[in-house]
Amino acid sequence: MGKRILITGAAGFLGSHLCDRFLSEGFLVVGMDNLLTGNIKNIEHLFPVKEFEFYHHDVTKFVHVPGAIDYILHFASPASPIDYLKMPIQTLKVGALGTHNLLGLAKSKGARILVASTSEVYGDPLIHPQTEEYWGNVNPVGPRGVYDEAKRFMESITMAYHNFHGVETRIIRIFNTYGPRMRLDDGRALPTFMSQALRGENLTVYGDGSQTRSFCYVDDLVDGIYRLLMSNYHRPVNIGNPSEITLLQFAEEVIALTGTTSKIVYEPLPQDDPKQRQPNITKAREILGWEPKVDRHEGLKRTLAYFKEHI
């Protein structure tokens, strides 16, 4: 029998791609999701697969999975500003109570657990690019604080379980990621720009568009997650694409790619919106032998094909 892995947030954008990858690697996959922001359509192609099983469950409640579990990937959480501003309590609970429950499960099963943290732990960063040693610049009582602090707590309790209970833990800090199965209405820059362009609407840029992001294609991210889980490194690791672009330039790229006649319109910058976001991936390169392979032009073409099917 193959190794058995529990993937929370399995019906989400990243979780569903992780289910695909680990099944392709010969794992028995247990997917878990409460479908708060996940979409069952992302994993319905897996239901006939005998190596896959699905639990409709909220990880903020006690988590029980019968039988052996060798690995856990904790990817359950609202992940876009539109979601966590609408569901602040659930966002805090899945980062705190959910992580606590899954660390307890990892301890009881003797499993290795990887938790999905985020570049948002750096807040609106005062250093650039961001290294794992940077402690961040987060407003704990601002509107984004519910997500940022949930992830910071997640990292703290994960390290506590590692240091106090000897649980095998891994922490990934994920930077902006994109690709097929993103929700068209999830409020982040790429799905918003693409949806607007395909509908012939004007593209909305916040502020003057000079804030930067670094976009990593989902297949590259999933490979980084796989390598980190299989590594012997327990401290946080940035996984993202260091190719930095302003949001104004990004909007212009989407307009050129889609061939739309849409224009760019400007709206006020939301509170605590990070001005810069670029990962330093030295650790990923040195420890995991990982770096992104799919360039933005190719990744955007693949993503556009998905959006055209689903718009």
Image (tube, rainbow, N blue to C red):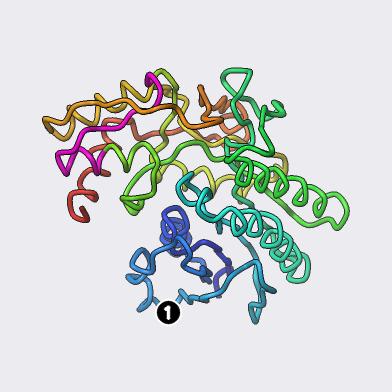
- Image point (23%, 40%), residue name: 196
Name the amino acid, label 1: Lys
Asked if the magenta segment contains residue 79, the reply would be no
Vertical placement of 83 versus 262: above or below?
A: below
Label 1 secondary element: loop
Q: Dot 1, how many residues are within 10 Å of its Cα: few (below 14), some (14-19), or many (20+)?
A: few
Between residues 107 and 89, which one lies in front from this camera angle? 89
- Coordinates of residue 300 in the picture (x, y in percent): 27, 37
- Image point (28%, 28%), residue name: 251
- Coordinates of residue 272 in the picture (x, y in percent): 56, 30
- Tell me the quadrant of the picture where the N terminus can be found: bottom right
Quarter occupied by residue 69: bottom right
- Coordinates of residue 71 in the picture (x, y in percent): 63, 62
- Coordinates of residue 119 in the picture (x, y in percent): 57, 35
Residue reaching furthest to the bottom: 66
User: Is 108 on the left or on the right of 7, as rendered?
Assistant: right
Between residues 55 and 205, which one lies in front from this camera angle? 205
Asked if the magenta segment contains residue 195, the reply would be yes
Between residues 207 and 254, which one lies in front from this camera angle? 207
- Image point (26%, 35%), residue name: 298
Q: Which residues are magenta?
A: 194-209
Residue placed under numbered mark 1 in the picture: 50
- Image point (58%, 67%), residue name: 6
Between residues 234 and 58, which one lies in front from this camera angle? 58
